[in-house]
Image (cartoon, rainbow, N blue to C red):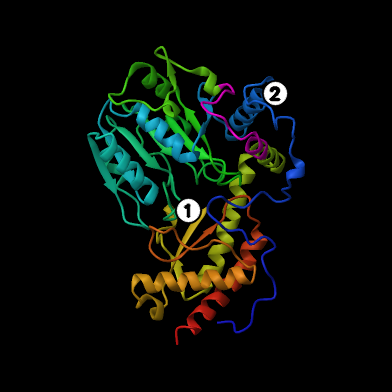
Amino acid sequence: MPETTPAVRPARPHFSSGPCAKRPGWSPQNFSTDTLGRSHRSKVGKARLKEAIDRTRALLGVPDDYRIGIVPASDTGAVEMAMWSMLGARPVDMLAWESFGEGWITDAVKQLKLDATILKAPYGEIADLSAVDPSHDIVFTWNGTTSGVRAPNADWISADREGIVICDATSAIFAQALDWPKLDVVTYSWQKVLGGEGAHGVLILSPRAVERLESYTPAWPMPKLFRMVKGGKLNESIFEGATINTPSMLCVEDYIDALTWAENLGGLEALHARADANAAALHDWAESAPWIDYLCANPGIRSNTSVCLKIVDPDITKLDDAGQRAFVKSMEKHLEEKGAAYDIGGYRDAPPGLRIWCGATVETADVKALGPWLDWAFAEAKSSLS
């Protein structure tokens, strides 16, 4: 283990899993300010919201007959809009392999009181995808931000399914290939792979999802923020640049700036490649560090964005849960004091460990520079135990 601090620091020590690192070269000076101080319902405001939607469609390759809307309350708001508006028409399979999937189960079972089949897996593993019933609705999180586990593909979703599929894709989209024909609702927050600001969600609906909205009325009262139907028909204005409540136009400009960067970079393929390169660089370091290992043992379902690691050094694993979490906090403190890494502790509901964001806005050189600093911080924290 190193006794001195490494010579090279990450140029940008931002490895938080949300909000994530801003794109390289980011500056607020790049923003258009024409919409600031204007109504989001003004001609210029609606035009910029529509531009964000249209450029999202082009960059992601969203099918022409799918709707895209900007909605309140980040990815959480988008998922809950879909669940509260569409579920209840038929039984539902709820899949979870991390804390956010667990949260959707709580909504479905305890709040909506649905007839739900629960398919769960511990942190680091994935649910039994073969057990999914194609006659049921499905709710799942493609990439488990807090577990580092992702769906390997969408082959397990039937093309002839009777139910709709709601996919929380917030840590997957822009970094992993999504199979659009298999997904009826896709949600995300632009604070993840594109490094945008928080509080806004994106909701993407297939024609099958629209049909569900227009043919089914839930038994429970619908909050205003979740209402997507007017007079029995989809409120198309939400998907054409209007919003249910007031968005931050500054955040919209930030998102458009990130989309522009991604387009200039080479589009979706380039974003995928950057995330893969970052995850590979972290893997090279992890393979050489005897004190660390992946929370997810199976490379086939391992995330390339929210990479979750566990400490396997026996002097640390013999500590109780509180002791292990305190050890991670000590590592975080050392790294932040040196300006080498920020916000890399595992999620509060996950097993104690580290979580390194490797999405496209992170530079591979910074990931490579991070590894020696993690070794140093581990040695520093461990030395204080004796």
In the image, 73 versus 203, the foreground residue is 73
Mark closer to the chain start, 1 or 2: 2
Q: Inspect the image, locate mark 1, and give the three-letter code of the amino acid beneath it.
A: Ser
Point out the frontmost of discs 1 and 2.
2
What stretch of residues is rendered in magenta?
240-254
Q: Inspect the image, locate mark 2, and give the three-letter code of the amino acid beneath it.
A: Val
Which image quarter holds the N terminus?
A: bottom right
The part of the image, by quadrant, that contains residue 105 is: top left
| Extreme residue toward the right, this view | 29
Using the numbered discs, state the Cα–Cα distance from disc 1 to disc 2 in whole angstroms.
39 Å
**Residue 8 relative to residue 359: left or right:** right
The part of the image, by quadrant, that contains residue 146 is: bottom left
- Name the residue at 56% across, 59% down: 280
Which image quarter holds the C terminus?
A: bottom left
- Does 367 lie within the magenta span? no
110 lies above or below 127: above
Q: Position of residue 336 (x, y in %)?
A: 59, 68
Q: Position of residue 249 (x, y in %)?
A: 64, 33
> Quick check: can you spot residue 90?
yes
- Does 243 lie within the magenta span? yes
- Name the residue at 66% across, 65% down: 10
Residue corresponding to mark 1 = 303
Secondary structure type for disc 2 = helix
Q: Position of residue 205 (x, y in %)?
A: 46, 27
Residue corresponding to mark 2 = 44
In the image, 331 versus 371, the foreground residue is 331
